[in-house]
């Protein structure tokens, strides 16, 4: 009767009646198996593979032959081809191994096999090494050396664990195992046309013994991991022809189920050595020795020396179960065996040697502080060096370490501030706190409010620097601060401790005004706001969607009067001495003829597209009408200080030298204008719409300005005031300076091709009598 089990589930063995008294012999089967053999080794033992642990990397299944008192152990590891393929398919579905290196996984395979070898060499009397070919696989020598080293490291720990268990005998605890097991070799294939099989087996024995002695895996002094019999055969070559494994299993099962042996077996083991009697006789020699005198493979190393006999014990089944459970808990662990991880250790040593060189490459010739782009460029250089000289599975780990060390080196006082200016340029200073101002190193040229003086300006980092501070300083140099100005609405504090408003808190109070804001955007009717706050100011700039009662802390727009309208001559244009920086032939304003209906109910002008300059408009119906001429211009300025006017939304003004400008201002007045336009200078820069020029006539009409800027699609519409169009005085030259940057509720709108000045900027109304 045979009882099968899967280690360490040994409950059914403990329940056997002979467990306390049966003296057993333990035979273990290790090695490799080829493809489509289901992990089956030593076919003559008759193992039938189970399916209950197909998802386990390594497992030990076995059976106990009660009649012969023999315990068979068969180990399935990742050296079995079918088990390895199944394990690989599981790895493909495991995200933890998605980027794992081959050597890292292979180290786990070898370490797992080595630990199972150690366990079996401690709990077995006879170990059969099965190999699918007919030549010795030299890789086993590496495993034997690694397991031997591992055994020497763990022997004290094993003995301590055995001595602390009362169920283990003192002699067994002192020796650490039942005996030094004998290792025999089983080769499943036989070379073709071999006439003398015995001679071939003896030649293999000589070679194997010579290799094991030269590598010092076995010794005649005892203490070896395993022993080779000195006077007995230990190599067996199978003469069985290759057969289908499933067919072989089925036939073996049928033979076991015949009368006399039918129900004396339980899967996975057969009770018979069918087909090959040579293997039965081969193993029977060792079984008989174990039953009688035991194994004593130690010989004296000198003529007058005598070595004590080796320890040998046949334990009872219960003693073996207690011993095996203790050994299993100590030896079978998910830890790598370092002596088997040769490729990984080489990779680590190589990476460890190259890492300082890569760090030196990163640090070579570095400035006192540098930007992130410079850090990344240096890091790529270091990675390139590491990649060319480092190898193996340790490379990702050391590449990550290199990145961390370079990052730490950069962050240790070498970081550049890199705070972006309003123009998108990074700060060139070392990383600093908010108490120090930023500096990008860029210096631009820009004209003052009136456009009569061009001053250098540093790259602004705040909206106040861009739209207010620079122009205040330029006005002092130009003296345009003394010119007549129209004051635009701005926050006027009534207390010393005023603050920036929280717009979310103002949304509820301004909900009733939101509808009015939409109506204002559509029909340009003035909005009626509540009294402006004197303790909280609007963050950013004024827009049509700004909450009622909030005004900006400072004004980003300006409206200045240069003087009388006679300052502009349409024949001469804007003089270079008073308006520097204009490109050749672009310094002219455009005439705009407007038909006005006096005493009409319409407050906004009716533009006569077909009006003839110098003539009065024809009266239509009962309403009298007359035509007025207004000179208007839209001025663009690039960061190099170049200035020019547009003749149309898509065309720069170009006047022929010595002639009158033929273009009119109708397209400018009636169209949306781009906020940014390519400058014709060599730099290929974008020029920004910064000034609106208006020369008002002497006629009894009022010219108005109502600029609305939308810096991006879907963005708020920026305005200078919420009180409607601004009326200009008669017979005067007015210039409105637009903001340099646009910020609403702390959101900055950078240069955008879709940014535009909405039409309806220029207008004329009748003077109230």
Image: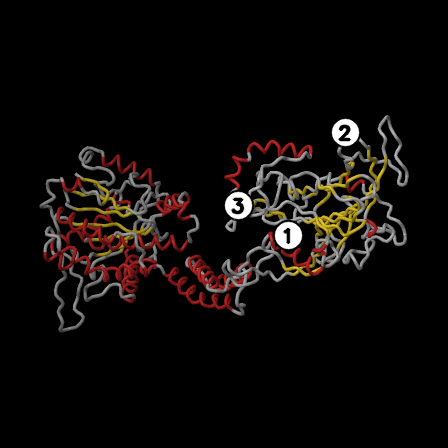
Cα distance in 3D space between marks 2 and 1: 39 Å
Residue 420 lies left or right of residue 317; in this view the side is right
* Residue behind mark 3: 535
Q: In which quarter of the image is the N terminus?
A: top left
Q: Dot 2 surroundings within 10 Å: few (below 14), some, or many (20 or more)?
A: few
Q: Is residue 307 above or below residue 533?
A: below
Where on the picture, by quarter, is residue 335? bottom left
Res 542 seen here: yes
Mark 3 element type? loop
Mark 2 element type? loop
Where on the picture, by quarter, is residue 230? bottom left
Of residue 25 and residue 682, the one placed in the foreground of this image is: 682
Where on the picture, by quarter, is residue 40? top left
Residue 100 lies left or right of residue 121; in this view the side is right
Pinpoint residue 758: horizontal percent, then vertical percent. 70, 40
Sequence order check, earlier mark of 1 and 3: 1
Pinpoint residue 522: horizontal percent, then vertical percent. 67, 33
Sequence order check, earlier mark of 2 and 3: 3
Which label lies toward us, 2 or 1? 2
Res 228 seen here: no
Of residue 45 and residue 713, the one placed in the foreground of this image is: 713
Mark 1 element type? helix
* Residue behind mark 2: 601
Sequence order check, earlier mark of 2 and 1: 1
Q: Dot 1 surroundings within 10 Å: few (below 14), some, or many (20 or more)?
A: many
Pinpoint residue 344: horizontal percent, then vertical percent. 38, 59
* Residue behind mark 1: 467
Pinpoint residue 255: horizontal percent, then vertical percent. 24, 36
């Amino acid at each position: 009767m045979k009882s099968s089990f899967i280690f360490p589930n040994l409950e059914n063995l403990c329940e056997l009646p002979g467990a306390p008294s049966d003296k057993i012999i333990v035979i273990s089967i290790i090695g490799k198996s080829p493809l489509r053999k289901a992990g089956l080794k030593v076919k003559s033992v008759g193992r039938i593979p189970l399916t209950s642990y197909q998802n386990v990397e390594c497992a030990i299944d076995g059976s106990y032959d009660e009649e012969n008192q023999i315990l068979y152990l068969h180990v399935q590891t990742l050296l079995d081809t079918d088990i390895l393929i199944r394990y690989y398919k599981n790895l493909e579905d495991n995200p933890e191994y998605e980027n794992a290196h081959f050597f890292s996984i292979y180290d786990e395979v070898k370490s797992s096999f080595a630990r199972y070898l150690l366990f079996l060499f401690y709990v077995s009397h006879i170990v059969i090494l099965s190999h699918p070919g007919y030549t010795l696989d030299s890789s086993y020598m590496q495993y034997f050396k690694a397991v031997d080293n591992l055994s020497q490291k763990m022997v004290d720990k094993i003995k301590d664990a055995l001595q602390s268990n009362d169920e283990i005998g003192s002699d067994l605890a002192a020796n650490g195992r039942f005996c030094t097991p004998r290792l025999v070799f089983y080769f499943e294939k036989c070379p073709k046309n071999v006439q003398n099989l015995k001679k071939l087996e003896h030649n293999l024995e000589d070679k194997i013994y010579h290799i094991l002695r030269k590598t010092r895996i076995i010794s005649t002094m005892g203490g070896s991991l395993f022993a080779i019999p000195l006077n007995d055969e230990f190599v067996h070559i199978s003469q069985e022809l290759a057969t289908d494994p499933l067919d072989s299993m089925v036939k073996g099962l049928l033979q076991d189920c015949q009368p006399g042996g039918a129900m004396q077996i339980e899967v996975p083991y057969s009770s018979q050595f069918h087909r090959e009697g040579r293997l039965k006789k081969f193993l029977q020699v060792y079984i008989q020795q174990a039953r009688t005198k035991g194994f004593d493979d130690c010989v004296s190393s000198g003529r007058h020396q005598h070595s004590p006999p080796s320890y040998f014990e046949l334990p009872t089944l219960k003693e073996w179960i207690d011993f095996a459970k203790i050994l299993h808990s100590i030896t079978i662990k998910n830890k790598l065996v370092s002596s088997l991880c040769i490729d990984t250790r080489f990779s680590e040593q190589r990476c460890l040697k190259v890492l300082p060189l890569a760090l030196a490459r990163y640090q070579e010739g570095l400035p006192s502080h540098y930007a992130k782009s410079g850090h990344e460029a240096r890091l790529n250089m270091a990675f390139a060096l590491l990649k060319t000289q480092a190898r193996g599975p340790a490379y990702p780990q050391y590449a990550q370490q290199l990145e961390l060390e370079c990052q730490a080196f950069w962050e240790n006082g070498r970081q550049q501030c890199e705070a972006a200016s309003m123009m998108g340029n990074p700060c060139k200073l070392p990383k600093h706190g908010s108490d120090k101002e930023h500096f990008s190193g860029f210096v631009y040229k820009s004209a003052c409010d009136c456009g009569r003086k061009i001053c250098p300006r540093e790259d602004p980092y705040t909206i106040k620097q861009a739209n207010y501070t620079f122009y205040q300083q330029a006005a002092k140099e130009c003296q345009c601060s003394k010119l007549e100005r129209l004051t635009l609405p701005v926050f006027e504090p009534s207390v010393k401790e005023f603050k920036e408003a929280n717009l979310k808190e103002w949304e509820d109070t301004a909900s009733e005004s939101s509808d009015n804001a939409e109506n204002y955007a559509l029909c340009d009717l003035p909005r009626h706001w509540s009294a402006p706050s004197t303790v909280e100011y609007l963050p950013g700039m004024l827009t049509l969607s700004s909450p009622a009662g909030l005004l900006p802390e400072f004004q980003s727009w300006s409206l200045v009067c240069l003087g009388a309208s006679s300052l502009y001559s349409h024949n001469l244009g804007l003089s270079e001495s008073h308006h520097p920086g204009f490109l050749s032939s672009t310094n002219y304003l455009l005439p705009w003829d407007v038909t006005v209906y006096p005493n009409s109910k319409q407050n906004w002008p009716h533009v006569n597209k077909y009006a003839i300059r110098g003539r009065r408009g024809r009266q239509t119906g009962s309403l009298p009408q007359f035509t007025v001429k207004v000179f208007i211009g839209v001025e663009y300025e690039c960061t190099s200080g170049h200035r020019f006017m547009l003749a149309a939304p898509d065309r720069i003004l170009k006047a022929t030298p010595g002639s009158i400008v033929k273009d009119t201002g109708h397209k400018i007045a009636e169209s949306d204008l781009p906020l940014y336009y390519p400058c014709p200078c060599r730099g290929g820069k974008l020029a920004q719409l910064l000034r609106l020029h208006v020369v008002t006539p002497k006629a009894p009409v009022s010219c108005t300005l109502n600029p609305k800027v939308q810096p991006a699609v879907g963005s708020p519409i920026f305005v200078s005031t919420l009180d409607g169009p601004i009326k200009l005085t008669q017979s005067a030259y007015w210039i409105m300076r637009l903001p340099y940057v646009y910020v609403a509720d702390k959101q900055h709108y950078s240069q955008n091709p879709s940014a535009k000045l909405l039409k309806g900027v220029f207008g004329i109304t009748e003077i109230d009598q």
